[in-house]
Image: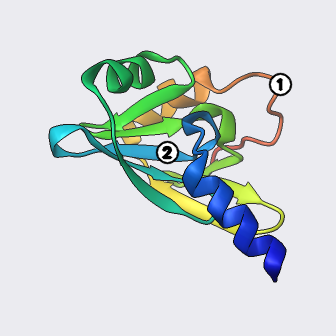
Amino acid sequence: MMNVGLEERGVYEDLNPYETYFFKIGAHGLVCFHGRNYSIKQRLSAEQTSKLISDPRFYRISTNCYVNLSQVSEIRDNVVWFRDERHGIKTIHVPRRNLEQMKRLIPSQRGTVTAGVN
């Protein structure tokens, strides 16, 4: 039990945006990062936000939402799945018009990414 508390504390103190599953940009520089077992809101400068959204690891799926392509484990029926052996599955809906481009951008070494039929 104590290890879990220490791990969560580390996530909040030492958030690495490149390990998150996706993030959403809000008003006034507020960014909400979603990861395996957390959602953390942080205020970022315009420069920091610009650096994140221009990184090729992140793909914009809506006006304010970006998915970390390196964390995607599966795509099924307009839903992107993120799997973690310890914490389970987290999902996010992706508009159909973005799916094909997103599939092309996912790193080729990720053999587990599949597309659902619908």
Question: Where residue 59 sits in the image (x, y, percent)?
Answer: 46, 29
Residue found at the far bottom of this picture: 1
Instruction: Judge left or right: residue 111 versus residue 5.
Output: right
The residue at which mark 2 appears reads as 22
Question: Where residue 89 sits in the image (x, y, percent)?
Answer: 67, 65
Q: Which mark is residue 10?
A: none
Residue 35 appears in the figure: no
Q: Residue at horizontal 57%, vertical 24%?
A: 57
- Asked if the residues shown at circle 1 and circle 2 are in contact, with their CB atoms under 8 angstroms apart, the answer is no
Work out whether 20 lies above or below 55.
below
In this view, the residue in front, 14 or 66, is 14
Q: Which mark is residue 109?
A: 1
Question: Where residue 51 sits in the image (x, y, percent)?
Answer: 41, 18
Please, what is the three-letter code of the amino acid marked with disc 2?
Phe
Q: Where is residue 18, by image quadrant?
A: top right
Helix, strand, or loop for circle 1? loop
Instruction: Judge left or right: residue 1 versus residue 40.
Output: right
Please, what is the three-letter code of the amino acid marked with disc 1?
Gln
* Label 1 packing within 10 angstroms: few (<14), some (14-19), many (20+): few
